[in-house]
Image (cartoon, rainbow, N blue to C red):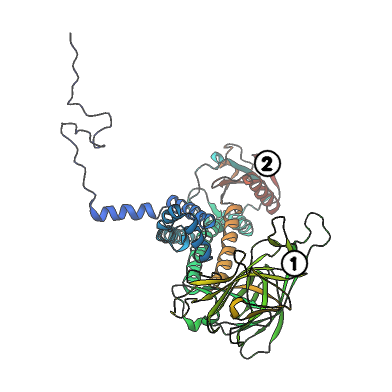
């Protein structure tokens, strides 16, 4: 006999599941979700706690490229150098906005989605918790003996005319002292008290999540209305907090020039302490100390100290010390003998001994503009190849080693140029190691004439400079406050137990030991933990101790 399969039977998934069949045959009609249903489903998924946690983790991962690659908002010069050195990789990274991570489209999208997810997740929970706060403790179980922690006390010395309601009132007072929210229930066959504590656990949880929303909002406010700027200040010079005073400036999207706090910072003296005792770290700097004078409208100038990791707080703005170096004082005379430039020139350190790159452009020189590029050596020396090097970061034997040029510097066209780069394409060399005239070697206090009667250069002296980072973040204080609240809420939610307790009173003959009536009262109690609570047994013991102390003449009949 051949066996055949009856294809008219419903599938194992049951009727109405997936693409099963009805009992009478035919496919089950699955209703279409529709656009509105899709939106509701998407909102439900977005506002779930699982999605919020995933987005929070994703946001943390998204910040990693910001520490791996240079950022334009922090160091645009380094980004330009990266693109020059690695053009192919750099173009791909730039296409994905990895040089502008924190202002990129994808980072902003994650940030915004996390913000919406937390709001959609926390506010409904807060509403439910408010309802729970107004909800009485759960009803008393019929049998307290089924609870994991329970016990029974027999009280034999209570007055016969003492009503059960007073016993319950005294029991409720004991529970209130332990932080329970109590409801006395005199009705029913067996009068009882229901109590619950630990509502603050959920309050702490909500505070934690609301604080996360506050942190995100405060960071966004700081990014919109804050600003960051950099300025190099030479000894004796002042920085005034105006836009034209900054060397570089990065405003927030909502920044307005009128929001700049009026103040000034004057660099009086910059001191560096070097290690002169250790044999392994000899010559390394161990302390940077900038002595400054700060001034605000309506107040007297104030002498202050500025150190690394100890910023100045002035006008709601933080001023950080982020770098330092030497600024040789140079005087340049042109071919007519006139002073075309006189003042300090910032030299950029290239190594630990402050071998520094120096670029000087003199557009006012006549009959030709002059340009200089080379090195400043605090303690000049020569290596085995005959190349000048610095032997020590202190200015023991300061020296300038420069190449000089004349021609069109390209400044008259008005195009912006990097002050630390000299474009020599349209210039003619006057001094260099490749020419008979050789390079310029100028010691402190020395004047050297330029070839072809183009003028002279004088090394007058040395000043120090400090690189300042000026940072204004209106969201910084709110971030600190919300972060502290988040830690507080997390601690409360982790260490606050959620417990329920019930107490019943009935004549001795109606308790857990029926038929053993001594004319007294039976007090039954039970304690239940909501979630993991290793101290719930200790809570039950303490409750029993309180009941035994409140009602004398008790005896343990059941534990």
* Residues packed near mark 2 inside 10 Å, few (<14), some (14 to 19) or many (20 plus): few
Q: In this picture, is 124 found above or below 288?
A: above
Q: Residue furthest top?
A: 1
Query: What numbered label is drawn on residue 30?
Result: none
Q: Which mark is residue 556?
A: 2
Question: Which corner quadrant holds the N terminus?
Answer: top left
Q: Is residue 232 above or below residue 537?
A: below
Q: Residue at 58% x, 68% y: name it.
A: 481
* Residue 284 can be seen in this image: yes
Image position of 16 with respect to 110: above or below: above
Q: Which residue in the rendered view is the most extreme toward the right? A: 277
Quadrant of residue 532 within the rendered picture: top right
Q: Secondary structure at mark 1?
A: loop
Percent from the top left, x then y, of residue 385?
A: 69, 56
Between disc 1 and disc 2, whose residue precedes? 1
Residue 42's spot in the image, x, y percent?
33, 53
Q: Which residue is mark 1?
A: 379
- For the point 56% across and 77% down, the residue is 370
Q: Between residue 122 and residue 56, name the one nearer to us.
A: 56
Quadrant housing residue 43: bottom left
């Amino acid at each position: 006999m051949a066996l055949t399969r009856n294809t008219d039977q419903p599938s194992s998934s049951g009727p109405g599941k997936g693409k099963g069949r009805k009992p009478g045959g035919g496919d089950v009609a699955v209703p279409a979700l529709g656009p509105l249903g899709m939106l509701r489903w998407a909102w439900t998924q977005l506002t779930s706690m699982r999605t919020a946690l995933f987005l929070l983790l994703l946001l943390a991962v998204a910040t990693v490229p910001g520490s791996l690659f240079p950022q334009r908002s922090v160091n645009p010069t380094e980004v330009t150098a990266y693109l020059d050195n690695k053009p192919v990789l750099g173009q791909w990274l730039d296409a994905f906005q990895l040089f502008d991570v924190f202002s990129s489209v994808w980072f902003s999208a994650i940030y915004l989605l996390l913000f919406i997810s937390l709001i959609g997740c926390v506010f409904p929970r807060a509403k439910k918790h408010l309802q729970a706060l107004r909800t009485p403790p759960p009803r008393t179980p019929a049998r307290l003996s089924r609870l994991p922690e329970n016990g029974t006390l027999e009280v034999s010395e209570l007055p016969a005319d003492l009503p059960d309601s007073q016993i319950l009132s005294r029991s409720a007072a004991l529970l209130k002292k332990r932080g329970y929210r109590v409801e006395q229930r005199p009705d029913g066959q067996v009068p009882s008290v229901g109590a619950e504590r630990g509502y603050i656990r959920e309050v702490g949880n909500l505070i934690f999540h609301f604080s996360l929303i506050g942190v995100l909002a405060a960071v966004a406010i700081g990014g919109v209305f804050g600003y960051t700027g950099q300025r190099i200040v030479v000894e004796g010079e002042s920085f005034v907090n105006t836009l034209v005073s900054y060397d570089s400036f990065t405003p927030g999207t909502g920044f307005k020039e009128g929001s700049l706090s009026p103040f000034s910072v004057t660099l009086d003296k910059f001191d560096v302490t070097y290690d002169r005792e250790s044999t392994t770290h000899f010559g390394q700097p161990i302390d940077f100390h900038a002595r400054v004078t700060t001034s605000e409208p309506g107040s007297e100038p104030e002498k202050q100290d500025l150190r690394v990791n100890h910023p100045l707080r002035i006008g709601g703005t933080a001023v950080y010390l982020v770098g330092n170096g030497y600024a040789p004082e140079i005087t340049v005379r042109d071919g007519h003998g006139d002073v075309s430039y006189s003042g300090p020139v910032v030299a950029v350190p290239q190594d630990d001994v402050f071998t520094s790159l120096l670029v000087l452009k003199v557009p006012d020189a006549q009959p030709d503009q002059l340009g200089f590029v080379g090195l400043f050596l605090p303690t000049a020396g020569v290596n085995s190849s005959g190349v000048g090097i610095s032997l020590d970061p202190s200015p023991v034997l300061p020296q300038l080693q420069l190449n000089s040029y004349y021609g069109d510097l390209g400044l008259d066209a008005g195009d912006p140029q990097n002050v630390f780069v000299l474009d020599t394409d349209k210039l003619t060399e006057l001094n260099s190691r490749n020419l008979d005239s050789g390079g310029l070697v100028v010691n402190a206090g020395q004047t050297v004439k330029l070839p072809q009667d183009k003028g002279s250069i004088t090394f007058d002296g040395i000043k120090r400079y400090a690189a300042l980072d000026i940072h204004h973040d209106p969201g910084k204080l709110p971030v600190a406050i919300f972060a502290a609240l988040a830690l507080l809420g997390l601690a409360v939610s982790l260490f606050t137990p959620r417990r329920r307790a019930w107490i019943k009173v009935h004549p001795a003959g109606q308790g857990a030991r029926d038929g053993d009536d001594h004319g007294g009262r039976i007090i039954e109690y039970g304690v239940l933990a909501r979630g993991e609570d290793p101290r719930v047994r200790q809570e039950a013991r303490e409750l029993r101790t309180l009941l035994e102390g409140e009602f004398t003449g008790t005896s343990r009949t059941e534990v």
